[in-house]
Each structure stands twice: as C-alpha cells, then as structure tokens.
Image (cartoon, grey):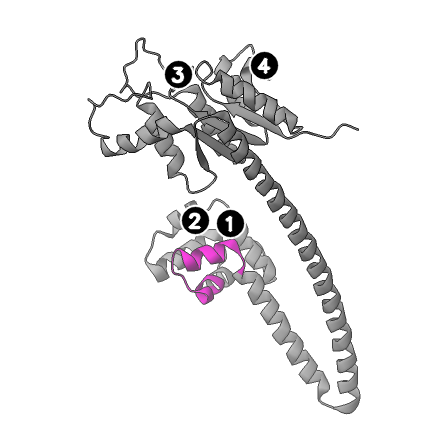
Amino acid sequence: MNMAKPRIFISSTYYDLKHIRYSLDIFISGLGYETILSEKGDIAYSYDIPLDESCYKEVDNVDIFVLIVGGRYGSEISSNEKKPDKKFYDRYESITKKEYDSAVKKDIPIYIMIETNVYSEYRTFLKNKENKTVNYAHADSVNIFHFIEDILSKPRNNPIQPFEKFDDIEIWLKEQWSGLFRDLLNKKSQQNQIRTLTTEVSELQEINKTLKIYLEEILKTSNPHSKEVIEKEDKRLLDISVRKELENNRWVKQCISTYGISFADVINFIRSSSSINDFVLKLDKKYQDDANSLLSFEPEATEDINDIRRVLNLKKLQ
C-alpha cells in the first residue's frame, strides 16, 4: 500500500538558483517526500489561464512551502501591465513573491532561505530606504529588499536562514523538519490525553448524577421538607448552567467586550423584545449608540440573539 507523501513546493527564481533547486530536489526526494518544481513538469498548467496562475493554484495542493531568495527578483506576474527595461528602483510584483503570498494565505509551514550577501545588503537598504542612488552589488531589484521586509513583518510562520552554500540549507531543513515531526508527535500525545480526560469527566458526571439521586432519596425519607430543598437546589444548578451557556454566546461576548454593554442589559433586552427592531431600539435608547450599525458588524447577530432566546425558552425574534 502506497503511503501519501508530503508535497513540498520549491519557490525561487530559476536561472540563478537552478543548482540549488536541483540539489533540493535530490535531498527532499531522498527523505521520501515529493518535490514540486516547475522545471520538472510537476505543475498542471491550465490552458485557459496564464502559466503563473497555475503555479499559485498548485500551492493550494502542497503541504510545505520552501522559498529561496537570491539576487534576482524574478519575472513579473501576468496580471500586471508589464513595462520593458525595468530599472532597479521600479516597483512591481514577481511570480516568486505571489507564490509566497499564496502559501501565506493557505497558512502552511513556510521555510525561507536567503543568500547571505543579499541578506547583508538588506540591512544596508534599511539605512538607505529613501536614497535611490545607492548601487547594490548583490541584488538586481530593490523589490528583493521590500520582499524580505514583507516576510520579516509577518507575526509568525516566517523562519529565515541565511545561506552561502547548499549544505547550509540541507542542515537547517533537516533540523527544522525533525522539530516539526516532534511537535506533531507531542500534539498527538496531548490529543490522546485530552480524550482520556474527556472520558473521565463524562464518567464523573454520571457518578455525580447517581450520587444526587441517592442523596435525594435519603433526604426524602429523613426530612419532611426535603422536596422544597431539592427543588431549590435543582433550580440553582439550572440557573448556573443557563448563565454559563449565555455567557459563552458569541454576541453576548461581543456586546460586553467591544461595546461595553452589561450582561444583564443584553439578556433583559433580548428577553423583553418583541422583534429584532425592538431589541435594537432598546439598545440604542439605553446606550445612545447606533445600534443598527452594531448589528451590521455582526452578520450572525440575529442567529445569536435567537440562540439566547432558545436557551431562555422564548420564541424566535423576527
């Protein structure tokens, strides 16, 4: 039986980094994974869209994205209005950058390698961003530095490793993927622990139900007023359960945290309203706010409000 192999997309400019791409193909295949390289014909090109659009679509079908940044920024995307003879400081978007953006959008693991000389010049660029007379030795376009700046601005999923030779890439990726595999094993173990705890909690709930029944029976035989005590306690437990469910309602949380509306007001307004418009008017009157605009920010607000009504055993609002 053939196991599904992790699919790894290699993104970079071709002519200046083809030796790196070739070595990466051998390295990744040796690990038993599947490399996706445009020069190998691994990308299914659609006849009715530009070639680069097929590359972006292929990123949606991979598991890991490897980006190599060298001294060339690369070809312009097909959707741009192309200008011949681009100068160093002309701004445009490249196919490689668009592939990277597609991987970011899909939120798959991304690993980024940048040539050491280019990364060093990036620091020079940061000190001379407004100076368009600087001659950079290791980059063919200022867009490379803006690309690196964009990568570094991401809050996560943007590990960078400078490299001088392919060995630097191989060692780093081995370490990174070993760590990724270990994290997956730990998460699997944690999931098993959570499942065990869930089972134990369910068992405790059943035990509590049984104990409650036993205690009620004992009270009934020993205390003539036990019925009132049991009913009062049942109501208290029910009120606690209902309040927890209401507090976890998405719209209730939004009203409290974002708009500063009290929990009591939200519930009372919903309980006493005869329609959604009535609810909005009450909200607006009390908080002197554009309540209609509040609801417009939450497309599912009506659904949430009616979910609260359900918990309170009330009819849906229209």
Q: Of the numbered discs in the image, which one, if any, rests on residue 76? A: 3
Using the numbered discs, state the Cα–Cα distance from disc 3 to disc 4 in whole angstroms: 21 Å
Nearer the camera: disc 3 or disc 4:
4
Q: Nearer the viewer, residue 117 or 269?
A: 117
Secondary structure type for disc 3: loop
Q: Nearer the viewer, residue 170 or 152?
A: 170
Mark with earlier residue (3, 2)? 3
Nearer the camera: disc 3 or disc 2:
3
Query: Label 4 amino acid?
Result: Lys
Query: Label 1 amino acid?
Result: Thr
Query: Label 3 amino acid?
Result: Glu
Residue displayed at 47% across by 16% down? 14
Asked if the stretch drawn in magenta spans residue 13, the answer is no
Secondary structure type for disc 4: helix
Asked if the stretch drawn in magenta spans residue 267, the answer is yes
Nearer the camera: disc 1 or disc 3:
3
Bounds of the magenta span? 248-268
Mark with earlier residue (1, 4)? 4
Q: Is residue 6 above or below residue 290?
A: above
Residue displayed at 33% across by 28% down? 145
